[in-house]
Amino acid sequence: TVVVEDDRTGLSVETLKRAFQDNLFYIQGKFANIATQNDYYMALAYTVRDRLLRRWLTTAETHTHQGVRTVAYLSAEFLMGPHLGNNLISLGIYDEAKQAITELGLDFDALLQQEEEPGLGNGGLGRLAACYLDSMASLDIPSIGYGIRYEFGIFDQDIRDGWQIESTDKWLRYGNPWEISRPEWAVEVKLGGHTERYTDENGRNRTRWIPHEVVMGIPYDTPILGYKTNTATTLRLWSAAAAESFDFAAFNSGDYFRAVQQKTVSETLTKVLYPNDESAQGKKLRLAQQIFFVSCSLQDMMLILIRQGIPLEQFHEKFAVQLNDTHPAIAVAELMRLLMDEHGIEWDTAWRITQKTLSYTNHTLLPEALERWGMGLFSTLLPRHLEIIYEINSQFLDDIRRKFPNDDARLSRMSLIDEAGERYVRMAHLACVGSHAINGVAALHSELLKQDVLRDFYELYPEKFSNKTNGVTPRRFMVLSNPRLTNLITSKIGDGWIKHLDDLRKLEAFVEDADFRQQWRDIKLAIKQDLATYIKQVNGIDVDPTSLFDIQAKRIHEYKRQHLDVLHIITLYNRIKANPDVHITPRTFIFGGKAAPGYFMAKLIIKLINSVGDVVNNDPDVRDRLKVVFLKDYNVKFAQRVYPAADLSEQISLAGKEASGTGNMKFSMNGSLTIGTLDGANVEIRDEVGAENFFLFGLTTPEVYELKAKGYNPYHYYESNPALKAVIDRIASGGFSNGDTNLFNPLVSTLLYKDDYLLLADYQSYIDCQDRVSQTYLDQEYWTRLSILNSARMGKFSSDRSIREYCEDIWYVKPVAVELKE
Ligand code: 26W
């Protein structure tokens, strides 16, 4: 008998080829001779999706039958990156697919590049959510990610004349093969209007909310398969649509125009991701987005229980709901409302369920990023939620009065309502009160939360607080993005490290092996060569692949101090101008990152980087020893090419400002050394890799506080440090702006007279440290040892470790094996 693999599930090269050709014809509707690159990509994507579906549906069925407890990860952002390559790796058929496509005469890498990534996030927070889905699936944790299906994700960035130009991210333009819409599971969300009291059939006093508007939420599901396991979790994103019941009313009254108009208002809700990271703006549409996806998600969880006949009194036993920052914090009031108003559960029971269900992760210490909603806005959009919040607040304040009598200052500091001037709802306070667990994202950050931002809450509920240091997935950020290094590592220690990243320690045994070091170096050089080719193509700049690749890639923000990096570049440039024969270790300075469109200073920093590049890259005195490159449109897809190419990773935020950082981990795993401050997870990275393998500089957090307390005067540093003065003077005098002294004036005067992020205070320490970096790089054998040790000691920073900790300490969720039936 002949055994023929099923076209939709078979994993052999021959079957993959057949399925691919079948999909090209029947899904894309094309003969090969007229198919575009995108048709080929889609045909391969559908081929892969078919192979996910059996695992995905079996996972759902298994979880339903076993009545498991499930993690619901609520996040306004999921920065997934391209799916195709990752799914091939999870399925374990990357090589087979590559062979199949190559044998069909097509360019496999080009097909992978064809995928337009869903950029549904700003930066670290959104990417963290994506890494956590990968780890939850890989660890067989029953889970679901809930978020918003933005029609336009984070804007595309172009650079014109050195300035950032934004354009819309039309990621759905050519269709999305990874999602399946589930209109049959749509739910309705109310907005605006007023509330009424009434007595129900049992004679109880109840509240009903008469909304001004109802919006429909349609779920779109994407399977997220774990690495070499059958568990596929779900990313369920909600898209807003006009509610039919409302259309009907308008149609019946003959107001066709209003009905159609209503439809466009509803559909605006999920149009676009807000591109601000770290600055809360108080826009009505953003609050509407938050309640929209939170309400849809909680209703969805309730429907899942109701369909199984499970009473809602057991909600907290069946779901652990994690709030990814305060963006979904309205869940506290919404869960109370749904339990009480929609399902008739009493306040006390509802409150117990709510607290046991919810937990809150804080991602920022920056005061301007703490979300608060103006009372006018809040009461207009969410009148019922405001009543519930008032009641929670009144009980909460009573509790404080009992524990801290006669402390009015404490009451007003902790109240859910800020009443200092204009009144606001404080979302972080709501999240803290409504959750049983509160965590920060790195050890230092969690300590600072307790001492500073959430100090009062820590004094009230110390048992709620813990730390969960962030992690990143080695599947995407090593295996997928760095196949060469992956193969070398696996050839030495086997492939167990991909699921157990601590195993990378086994590499330490090879540090003294000169052959191994040579291979390690060759790989880094080849990757740098590829990036150099890309830079030549896109930026038109020649860079030397043997030079030190010094990379800072992340959102552009003053606290992250991209401009401190620039001060170093100009320092080296000044040394060359003073003496063209001075010894300089050749370096290529590479920047990537987007600035919030309304953040003037961040945009000016981009302009400065490009302007310094124009001068330095073209000055014959430099003799190509320094190059400055700004890579436009930094996103996940591009990041995957950038991390492996770095020799040096810049993690130079002012101590106490970066909650964790996750790029720092991705660079280091790929053998980059770090120059960094004692901020966020840098502290723990340094602990793991060893102080001797980490370039440390700058003030510590207590030193920062102290300096600010005694009165910081940046001008003093400028006056008393000639090298620093020469750098600032070169900018101020138009050295990078064709003599224009106005262009960079806002930046220069901010540094000289304000300098909130202490660049001038950290300048000399940074320069001295960079000089040590340059010196160290000259000894390539030594540098390679450090590079290997950095990778070898990054086990802690796998998101698998983070997820295990959340499961143990916060969620109380256990792995469930999924078996495929024949
Ligand atoms: C309200 C506007 C807004 C939008 C997004 C404020 C704040 C945010 C995020 C919290 C920004 C963010 O991505 N924070 C980053 O989260 C990462 C994951 O925990 C950390 O590694 C970064 O340090 C933190 O900046």
Image (cartoon, rainbow, N blue to C red):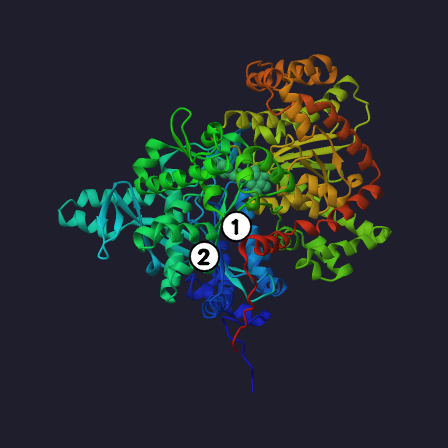
Residue 728 pos. (x, y %)? 66, 17
Mark 2: which secondary structure?
helix
Q: Residue 192 vs residue 276: left or right? A: left
Q: How far from the left and from the top, in percent, is residue 399?
A: 45, 40
As displayed, is residue 340 above or below residue 536? below
Q: Is residue 364 something one can see in this rendering?
A: yes
Determine whether 623 is above or below 717 in the image.
below
Q: Residue furthest bottom?
A: 1
- Report which residue position mark 1 lands on: 80
Circle 2 is placed at which residue position?
A: 316
Q: What residue type is labelled 1?
A: Met
Q: Residue at x 40, y 28 (%)?
A: 419
- CB atoms at circles 2 and 1 under 8 Å apart? no
Q: Position of residue 576 (x, y in %)?
A: 76, 22
Tell me residue 72's x, y (percent). Answer: 47, 54
How many labels, in total? 2
Q: Quadrant of residue 730?
A: top right
Quadrant for residue 271, please give it.
top left
Which of the pair 766/442 is nearer the observer? 442
What secondary structure is marked by label 1?
Answer: loop
What amino acid is found at the position of numbered circle 2 in the picture?
Answer: His
Asked if residue 597 is positioned above or below residue 508 in the image, the reply reads above
Is the CB–ligand 1 distance for label 2 below 8 Å? no
